[in-house]
Image: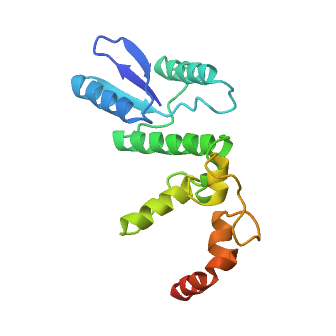
Amino acid sequence: MAVTLELPEGYSRIFTVFLHDRFARTKFNDIIGQIQSIRINLVKATGHDSTYGNELADQHARDKAKMIAYGNISAPSNITTDDAYKIASEISIKSWQHYWDHESKGRYTYHMIPSVGTKVTFPGCRDIGISYCRILIHDTMLKSDSYRTGISDTSLCECGKGEETIEHFLLHCGIYAEARCDMMDCL
């Protein structure tokens, strides 16, 4: 987000403000509060479109903002602070999603919750909530996780039909067939 400030003396300065984190929003609000007499024109300068590297994208955004400030190109429109926050929020979510899609870590959780911003509802029972979190972070006491972390000598289930994974434990293990039937009846 580029912010063009037109100072009363006719000077103009251009700041690039990244509104995607709490600190930047707080700092931005502080600046706004201190300079009430200055006319502020918020414009969206797409800094990361077709540009590789953050430095290049940031320079592109600054160049666009300067062109707007000097009148070389027109700003798309004036927007309110609320609109600026909405745009910054959209940019942040898209950036976070891109990072989540291409990150090599957390793939187990990614397969269960592929979209950022997904609201996870936890049960009222604390013990069940803890078990749910352990499933999400791939850190249960099942043998597949214990073997992966070096706690268990084997990842195989005691039933002998495969690895003791969450899927096996909940859906396939013969040892828990009766409990699974009870669970399915409750669903």
Give the image location of residue 134, x and y in percent: 51, 56
Q: Image check: 108 left or right of 40? A: right
**Nearest the eye: 51 or 130:** 130
Q: What residue do we see at 52% from left, 45% from top?
A: 93
- Splitting the image into 4 quarters, where does residue 81 fall? top left
Q: In the picture shown, does residue 84 fall above or below 124?
A: above
Give the image location of residue 50, x and y in percent: 69, 31
Give the image location of residue 133, x and y in percent: 49, 57
Q: How is the image coloured?
A: rainbow
- Splitting the image into 4 quarters, where does residue 135 fall? bottom right
Q: In the picture shown, does residue 83 fall above or below 36?
A: below
Q: In the picture shown, does residue 182 fall above or below 16?
A: below
Q: Residue furthest bottom?
A: 185
Number of numbered discs overlaid on the protein picture: 0
**Nearest the eye: 158 or 42:** 158
Residue 122 appears in the rendering: no
Residue 4 appears in the rendering: yes
Q: Image check: 29 left or right of 3? A: left
Q: Image check: 27 left or right of 157? A: left
- Splitting the image into 4 quarters, where does residue 173 fall? bottom right
**Nearest the eye: 77 or 157:** 157
Q: What residue do we see at 70% from left, 57% from top?
A: 155
Q: What residue do we see at 65% from left, 33% from top?
A: 49
Q: Residue furthest front?
A: 153
Q: In the picture shown, does residue 19 fall above or below 14?
A: below
